[in-house]
Image (cartoon, helix red, strand yellow):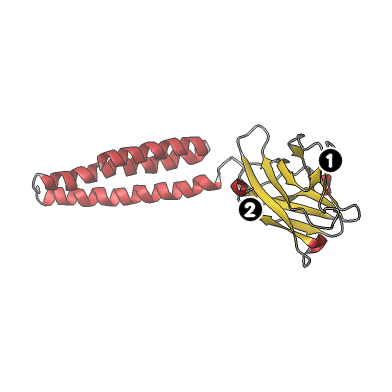
Amino acid sequence: MLQILEDTGKAFFEGALKHLPVWVVIPVLVGGVIWWFTGRGFVKRTVLNRAHGARGRRAFMFSLIYAATFAVGGTASVIGLFVADRFRSEPLLRLDSSLEPDREHKVLRLAVWNDGYGKAAPTAIVKWLKGGIQEHDSIMPLALGWMHDEQPQLSHGEHWKVDVVYVDLTRDILIFGNNRHYFRHVTIHTRTGEFIPVLFCIRVSIPGEEIFQERTFKLVPDSSRPFGMRAQEIDPVAR
């Protein structure tokens, strides 16, 4: 049990030093120190002493004092962990599980949130693209643009949308990419009018950081939805 307390204390100290600003670290570490040392004392004066016979009222009173201090230190540490999450400096990306149709601009968009507490200036790409009838399919990944051609700077709780695919029903094609880089045209019907499913993976990441999220979608025909198709999220392994 003492080893468990020591391991818990070590993990707590490392986590606090890594994720918290200095002015938050100090009270959190104080709580952790109290929790660690009094926890050790409590175990020694109860569990270990009991194994070798009780030492009377004095040992019992010390045990109560240690238990009370242990509770106070533990509470301070738990509160500190909540404070740690509030002041965490890294961004945390979250992607929607569906694509939002924009009839006016004829585009399907993916919403991106920053649930972390650091600023995020994400980029988005098509990691891979399969299905339909396409040429130059070896050119990957494809850089994507953002709604209204605005590069987002997301603070905590803010979101923006990626322009994933433009829909041109007149020419019977989907257009992936953006006007600053490269476009990929994908034909979505055969000559006999059969719909060809299109599968693709979108990756949104923070440049220079190992922070990213991915979503994989499959476009299938659906006459009840805008553009006559819907995007369903799928397991990337089942592509």
Whether residue 238 appears in this view of the structure is: yes
Determine the image quadrant of residue 102: bottom right
Q: Please give left or right for residue 144 compared with residue 22 in the image.
A: right
Kind of residue indicated by mark 2 = Ile
User: Element at badge 2?
Assistant: loop
Closer to the N terminus: mark 1 or mark 2?
1
Q: Please give left or right for residue 161 compared with residue 94 in the image.
A: right
Q: Residues within 10 Å of mark 2 (few under 14, many from 20)?
A: some
The residue under label 2 is 234
**Residue farthest along the front direction in this orientation:** 192
- Which image quarter is the N terminus in? top left
Image location of residue 134, percent across then percent down: 81, 43
Q: Residues within 10 Å of mark 1 (few under 14, many from 20)?
A: some
Q: Nearer the viewer, residue 35 or 130?
A: 130
- C-beta proximity under 8 Å, tags 1 and 2: no
The residue under label 1 is 183
Q: Nearer the viewer, residue 220 or 47?
A: 220
Kind of residue indicated by mark 1 = Phe
